[in-house]
Amino acid sequence: MPAQDDTQTRVLEDLDAAAIDYATRMAGASGAERAVLRDALTRTCLPFAGRMARRYRGRGESLEDLEQVARLGLVKAIDRYDPERGSFTAYAVITISGEIKRHFRDRTWGVHVPRRIQDLSLEVGHASMVLTTELSRTPTPLELAERLKVSEAAVMEALESAAGYSPSSLNAPAGGDGPVEFGDLLGGHDSDLEMVDDKLTVAGLLLRLPARERRMLAMRFYGNRTQAEIAAELGISQMHVSRLLSRSLAWLREAMLSDALPRWEGANGPADIHGMQVNVERGNGALTVRVHGEVDRDTAERLRTSLRHAISTAGGDRLVIDLAGVPLIDAAGVAVLVDTASAAGSGLVLTGAQPYVARILAVSGLQNLLGQG
């Protein structure tokens, strides 16, 4: 190995000496003599250009083409050589390498890649061959980065960009007996496209729900919150949350399947914020209290106040509580009715209860007041 290094050093020194002699003789030569001297130095340096070209073989370009490019770089180095600026060999290495890299960058890449990445890709390829020989295995990106004194991320980027050097054709056969091309295997049926209309429809319907229901649906299906977490944040029971979610989903499902917008059986419709209205009417020997909306923790005290006032003003009239407009009642609402029944005595009647509300009242001990009047 030392003998080979010594031989290479002597060759480089001989090229430097030949270049200096060439420059000296060119100073006093005529036009014809200049051409002869130029050709002679070029022939002397051709083996050196060939060795430079062989450094870049195995990268998709034929060795003959690389040698032609290297020789072009050699001629440029000879024509531009100035002995006062240093070694001819060093200048020739830079010129020939730059010409070969320019050839790879401008003529061989199938996909446009930034020049910085192209140059680094060539350096990575050359360093990979050298390290493979030294290590007897494929080098890692970290080893390549240490060899080239660049970051590992830059090496990874260069390795990924190397795929753009000779990209595969989409019209290339994909294998097998059938006339299937590679491009036929790309893409596929996008099932999400069929859901675009449904998603847009649901988005519009959600805006028609009360703000509380919209918030609960967002927390459950977009925020992945549990019913217990939603209940804690909204200050209601987990069972109440379950009922509200079920009712909202049922309404959305019915709205999606029907042409006309279904009636919202909630607190005075989607435009209202889980409110409750109490109307009092007197006639035919009865004081009728009509309740509209949900009776829950948020509205129970308002109902209690209204019913206490109704009891105080009923006089000898029978007290009738019309629950036809109540789609939902929770424990707080049941407690209000129980207290009212105790205060009003036998003169209290509950009418118009919807099936769900009627079941709640029945299991709460108010069944004897249902279905009367």
Image (cartoon, rainbow, N blue to C red):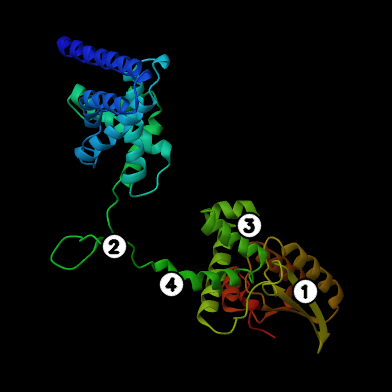
Which residue in the structure is indicated by mark 3? 236
Q: Residue furthest bottom?
A: 284
Amino acid type of disc 4? Glu
Amino acid type of disc 1? Val
Which tag, 4 or 3, sits closer to the chain's start?
A: 4
373 or 37: nearer the eye?
37
In this rendering, which labeled residue sits more in front, label 4 or label 2? 2
Which residue in the structure is indicated by mark 2? 183
Which tag, 1 or 3, sits closer to the chain's start?
A: 3
Q: Tell me which residue sits at (63%, 83%) in the image.
A: 371
195 or 48: nearer the eye?
48
Residue 256, position as x, y percentages in the image: 52, 77
State the image quarter where residue 117 is shown. top left
In this rendering, which labeled residue sits more in front, label 2 or label 1? 2
In this rendering, which labeled residue sits more in front, label 4 or label 1? 4
Give the numbered dot on residue 266: none
Which residue in the structure is indicated by mark 4? 194
For the residue labelled by badge 2, is the local secondary structure a helix, a strand or a loop?
helix
Amino acid type of disc 2? Gly
Q: In the shown orientation, is residue 284 left or right of residue 250?
A: right
Q: Tell me which residue sits at (33%, 24%) in the image.
A: 92
Amino acid type of disc 3? Ile
